Image (cartoon, rainbow, N blue to C red):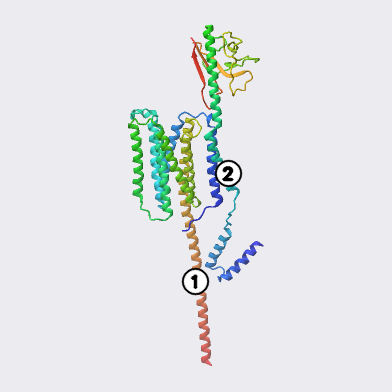
Amino acid sequence: MERVKLDRTHIGLQFLMMLISLLSFLVLACFVGEIVWIKDFQYFVILLSGVFAIFAGLIAMLRYYTQKESLTFLLLGVGFLAVGVLDVVQLIIDIGDFKNLFTYTPGEIYPFSSILSRAFLSLILFFSWVFRKKDSKKEKSKWNEKKIMLFVAGIFVLFSGIIASLVLSNVIEDSLWVVFAGIITFMFLLLSFIGYMFQKEWQYDNFHFWLIFAISFLLLSQIFFLPFLNLEYYNMMNLSIWAKFFAYVALLVGFLNSIYELYQKEVLIQKELEKKNKLLDETKKKVEEAYLVIRKEKWDLVRGEKKTSKKRKKK
Amino acid sequence: MVGTFFTLMYYIDMQEAGIAPNSGIDLLYKEQLQQKKEEKPVNKGFSILDFLVILSAFFVIGFLGYLVLNPEKQGADERNVHRSADVASILTAVSNYIDLKGEIPSNIPINSNCVSVGNEICKIGPYDCKGLVDLSFLTSNGNSNGGVISLPTDPSSKSINGSGYYISQDGQGNITICAPYAERNVDISFSKFVF
């Protein structure tokens, strides 16, 4: 089936909306110095983000199993489930209420646990772009569901292992490590963003626009996470977590939109099929009518011939 | 008029294609013609929407650049440093005066909350200090053993008579001086136990 490009105005408006959202966020960041944040704002948003990530993961899985057309949805689905779990784990190890479960002081490993969840998400998005590239080239992929599940599980175990080792060991004094990991995460996100932009799938598919929207907010989140802006530390962290939350919401909207479009496409195909059937019936009727007319004409002709032959005989 | 023209064109097309009117193929043909009519011409030009998208992208990059420098925060930080220095110098002067006189001046109000009405320090000079705390005794004119030359004022204070800094004591020997106009949620408040 030939792919149809989306309307140019529609695409323009989508990107304008994205840029205005980013701009609004940055304008807010300019005035954030005078804002008094609610108590435990970060924990609240991290919890919401975790819930949204798990929800987005489930929706992506649902989208994949509704129509198994691209492994990207599966990768993103499993990845987001894991990201949700990592976010919630980060929250648990960071708040004081669970301190009896661990052998460290809450808040001690905060930036490390936070960067691991971000790095994991950036890797998932980067690999989703790589898989999508293969899908669009119609190459016969060596990957299948089982391999993808194992791949994500492998990265997840690796990241959980790093968190566990950080919790159990006391070698987490140098925060330069966080900045380095943050820059690597930023680079992966930037690569995914550029990759998806140049792949131009957003010209055909609304989901890819929402994916780009989410990546752009994740990039913003990472910029606020890294210590390059001239803002207070707590403001940067709050804005970073908030931007990450917006990214999750955008991706969730993208998955829901994709499912909606899938069903909408089904309805259209059904309507098209009905129309084609109707046309076929009408053509069939016309052919039958034509056949009857021809048969009648043929009979008339035959009768006319018989009559003339009888007259000839009489003569 | 336009409708008649299209109908005429349609019948001419039909004759050229050799299709009998009102047959099944004819209906398909009609549909194709309708689709052709509905197809909008592709606008390859530079629209106002494209312009807005590019402009917004520049704004996003510009705001990021602005946040890297953030001159507003830099200015606020500098003013806060100035306030801290002012508060510290006033507290030192008050403490020295108390050390010299052996008592806390009675015009320093007793209040557990530093930022309260009536706790603002009055500017020194020809100002009306009614409802404000007059610390003119701290200046060299009022204190022969050396004090501050003049009382500093808050850089953001717009008060005519008030300095923008507040002073209070808790009645148990603690003097607190604070700067409520401190920017970016910074709390500038210094206390000292004088005796």
* Amino acid on which the number 1 mark rests in the picture: Glu
- Residue B71 sits above or below residue B26 on the image: above
Q: Is residue B20 visible?
A: no
Q: Chain of mark 1?
A: A
- Mark 2, Cα crowd under 10 Å, few <14 / some 14-19 / many 20+, is few
Give the amino acid at mark 2: Leu
- Please say whether residue B166 is visible from this viewpoint: yes
Q: Is residue B4 left or right of residue A206?
A: right
User: Tag count in the figure?
Assistant: 2
Look at mark 1 in the image and give the residue it sits on.
A288
Q: In the displayed image of the protein, which residue is found farthest to the top?
A: B102
Frontmost residue, A107 versus B91: B91
Give coordinates of residue A95: x percent, y percent: 40, 30
Quarter holding residue B153: top right
Residue at the spot of label 2: B55
Residue A102 x, y percent position in the rendering: 34, 30
- Picture quadrant of residue B80: top right
Q: Nearer the viewer, mark 1 or mark 2?
A: 2
User: Any mark on residue A164, and which?
Assistant: none
Element class at badge 2? helix
Residue for point 52% across, 80% down: A300
State which chain disc 2 sits on: B
The residue positioned 32% from the left and 32% from the top of the image is A168
